Amino acid sequence: MTEAIRGFWVASATPLAADGNVDHARLAAHARQLFGKGVDGVVLFGTTGEGTSFNAGERVATIEAMLKAGIAPERIGIGGGFPAITDSIALTRAVLGLGLRHVLLLPPYFDRNVTPEGIEDAFAAIIDGVADERLRASLYHIPQVSGVAIPTTVAANLRKRYGKQVAGLKDSSGDFKQFQAFRAAAPELAITVGNEPDIARAVAAGGAGTICGMANIVPELVKGMLDGKDVEARMQAVADVVVKTPSLVATLKAILAAQTGDTGWLRVRPPLRALSDGTALKRKLDALMAPAIA
């Protein structure tokens, strides 16, 4: 598990306390609950975790709290992408010092007109700046959100240059042809998918598994897809309910609040706005999830 992210990982939502800071106790409890349902690890401060709303210090403090709560470092990954390369370097060094190895790296995402060579330069500057053989980075491709795609040539070149330090790539484009292109260009990379309906066919095509947000609320369904059960249509129906909303993150948190009876899950950081209630959404999911997955 330490060489690359493989299997069933959750892009965790980030619970907030009343003062807007990360609720470390609630987050650790959420991770333990997910582990009890077959989850291999959690990635913190990714897209689903409102990662870009938290600075490096907040992210490191959260990792420290998770480790203190008994969560094993090999079961934690962290979003380490920032517009400033120096921030990515500082965060990555800090978490490696705490025993983590898995860092998801977005390309710097403010300038949308950069060249493939510039994107490769940016990733190389992070890896060279960290200068630590323990690093097992996963490149994070989510261009519909970040605005900057990772070309397949860049992924392949970085793997050739840095070997196991560039361990994987998370493809959250939702385009299965893009996943196949990454697999063809860089077959040594452990490529996970974020688009839940693609999980089963991605694994069948040599994918490493998933890092996905929907598993916060339907981990049994995601596990069913990884186990080869015929639940793709059900997953697509769940995704249609959750994704086709103004804010995926606020929707996931509202459903979590309804599932757990804990209204603290409703809280989000600006510029997101919280939903007032997720009960109706939970009912829709309950109907889609019945009968239980055998």
Image (cartoon, helix red, strand yellow):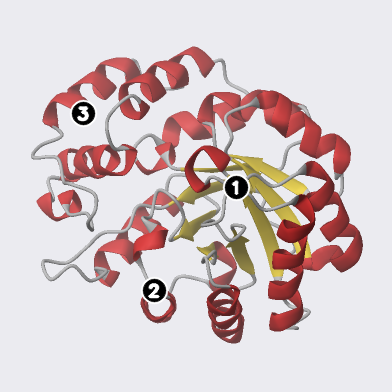
Q: Earlier in the sequence, mark 3 or mark 1?
A: 1
Q: Residue shown at 59%/35% (left/top)?
A: 173
User: Depth check: 136 or 9 in front?
Assistant: 136
Q: Is residue 291 above or below residue 137?
A: above
* Residue, disc 2: 55
* Residue, disc 3: 282
Real-space CA distance between mark 1 and mark 2, rounded to the nearest whole angstrom = 20 Å
Name the secondary structure under disc 1.
loop
Q: Earlier in the sequence, mark 1 or mark 2?
A: 2
The spot of residue 33 in percent (x, y) is: 35, 53
Q: As shown in the figure, which amino acid type bears the numbered disc 2?
A: Asn
Left or right for 129, reference 108: right
Badge number at residue 148: 1
Asked whether residue 174 is in view, the answer is: yes
Left or right for 158, reference 178: right
The quadrant of the image that shows the N terminus is: bottom right
Q: Is residue 235 above or below residue 142?
A: above
